[in-house]
Structure formats: C-alpha cells, structure tokens
C-alpha cells in the first residue's frame, strides 16, 4: 500500500509537471498540489482511455500510453487553472 501510494505521488508529480509544461498559455498560476492531483488523475484516466483503443500488453516502455497520460494531465491542468487559478492584477 505504501509503495503504490509513493509511486502514485512520484508518477503524478512527473506527469502533472509534463502536462503543465505542454498545456497552452500561462498555466503556472495553479499550486503544485493541484498539479500533482491533475497528474495522478491524468495517469489513471489516460491509461484507461489508451486501453480502450490499443492492446493492454506491450513489450518494453509504452511511450504512447505515457503520451496519453500527459495529454490528459494537460487538459486537466487547463481545467483546473480555469476554475482555481490565481488571477494577476
């Protein structure tokens, strides 16, 4: 349980930061904790969506699956920034 939670936090942080980096516009106005949550959700939803269209088992690192995860995280970062982003004066 601890290992899965730790990997979810690490993976969510990495995927969330990548999603934040590829999101169009200025998305640096959401807090880090929300970026991590978007990354974790992006990893889960992206893996599920990828599995709906492509085979589950692939040899080696599945870069396409990670691409889907980052794309979903970027969409979630955009949505989160729209709802909770800090406004500039």
Image (cartoon, helix red, strand yellow):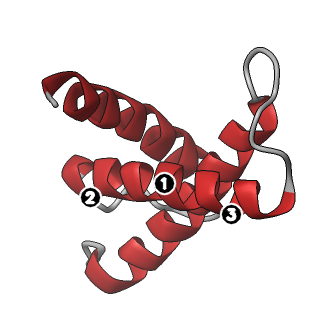
**Would residue 79 appear left or right of 10 to someone viewing this image?**
right
Task: Determine the residue positioned at 44% across, 32% down.
Answer: 14
Task: Determine the residue positioned at 61% across, 51% down.
Answer: 47
Residue 4 picture location, percent across and down: 27, 30
Q: State the residue position of label 3.
A: 49
Q: Nearer the viewer, residue 72 or 23?
A: 72
Label 2 packing within 10 angstroms: few (<14), some (14-19), many (20+):
some
Residue 50 picture location, percent across and down: 74, 55
User: Which residue is most to the bottom?
Assistant: 83
- Specify whether residue 23 is in view: no
Q: State the residue position of label 1.
A: 44
The mark total stands at 3
Q: Nearer the viewer, residue 66 or 16?
A: 66
Secondary-structure class at tag 2: helix
Depicted 32 relative to depicted 27: above or below: above
Task: Determine the residue positioned at 37% across, 74% down.
Answer: 80
State yes or no: discs 3 and 1 in contact (Cβ < 8 Å): no
The image quadrant where one finds the C terminus is: bottom left
The quadrant in which residue 75 appears is bottom right
Distance between the alpha carbons at the discs numbered 1 and 2: 15 Å
**Nearer to us: label 3 or label 2:** 3
């Amino acid at each position: 349980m601890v290992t899965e939670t730790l990997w979810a936090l690490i993976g969510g942080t990495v995927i969330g930061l990548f999603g934040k980096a590829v999101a169009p516009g200025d998305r640096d106005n959401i807090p880090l904790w929300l970026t991590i949550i978007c990354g974790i959700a992006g990893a889960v939803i992206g893996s599920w969506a990828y599995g709906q269209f492509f085979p589950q088992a692939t040899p080696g690192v599945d870069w396409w699956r990670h691409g889907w995860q980052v794309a979903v995280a970027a969409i979630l970062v955009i949505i989160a920034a729209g709802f909770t982003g800090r406004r500039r004066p």
